[in-house]
Amino acid sequence: MGPLLALLITFGLMWVLLILPQQRRMKQHQAVVASLRAGDEVVTAGGVYGTITSVDEETLAVEVAPGVVLRVLRSAVSQRIAPLEEMDDDDEDDDVPADEPPADKDGF
């Protein structure tokens, strides 16, 4: 009975530590891919940054430079890039003017 219990506990830990997080990541990726729209800035699995110009059922047209449009699979998009407005909201030093450098720890 002891070895069987140890095997079940090991399987349970493997499930919780390895399989569940991977399933969550997969669901998040599927949600991002399903919500892609024209105008979104994305990064492909190959590391190419671009802006979506048109969306089909399985493919996207991604403009990577002015006049250069790549056709990629939806699943090749690894992440959506947040617009600059959203990124600015997360800054911690909003009270420091942009033209002033941040002060050192000593205040100089």
Image (tube, rainbow, N blue to C red):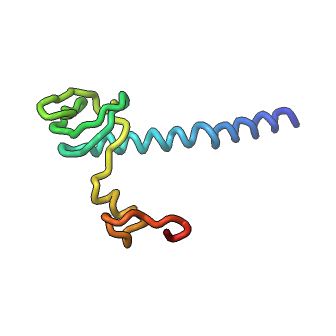
Q: Is residue 90 left or right of residue 2?
A: left
- The outermost residue toward the right is 2
| Residue drawn where x is 29% and y is 33% of the image | 74
Is there any visible trace of residue 51 in the rendered image? yes
- The outermost residue toward the front is 108
Q: Is residue 46 left or right of residue 103?
A: left
Asked if residue 3 is positioned above or below residue 41 in the image, the reply reads above
Q: Quadrant of the N terminus?
A: top right
| Residue drawn where x is 85% and y is 33% of the image | 3
- Of residues 85 and 73, the one drawn nearer to the viewer in this rendering: 85
Q: Is residue 1 left or right of residue 93?
A: right
| Residue drawn where x is 16% and y is 29% of the image | 68
Q: Position of residue 107 (x, y in %)?
A: 51, 71
- Of residues 50 and 100, the one drawn nearer to the viewer in this rendering: 100
- Of residues 17 and 44, the one drawn nearer to the viewer in this rendering: 44
Q: Position of residue 5 (x, y in %)?
A: 81, 38
| Residue drawn where x is 26% and y is 43% of the image | 41
Residue 14 is drawn in which quadrant?
top right
Q: Position of residue 104 (x, y in %)?
A: 50, 64
Q: How many dots with numbers?
A: 0
Residue 64 is drawn in which quadrant?
top left
- Of residues 56 and 49, the one drawn nearer to the viewer in this rendering: 49
Q: Position of residue 87 (x, y in %)?
A: 34, 57
Is there any visible trace of residue 1 in the rendered image? no
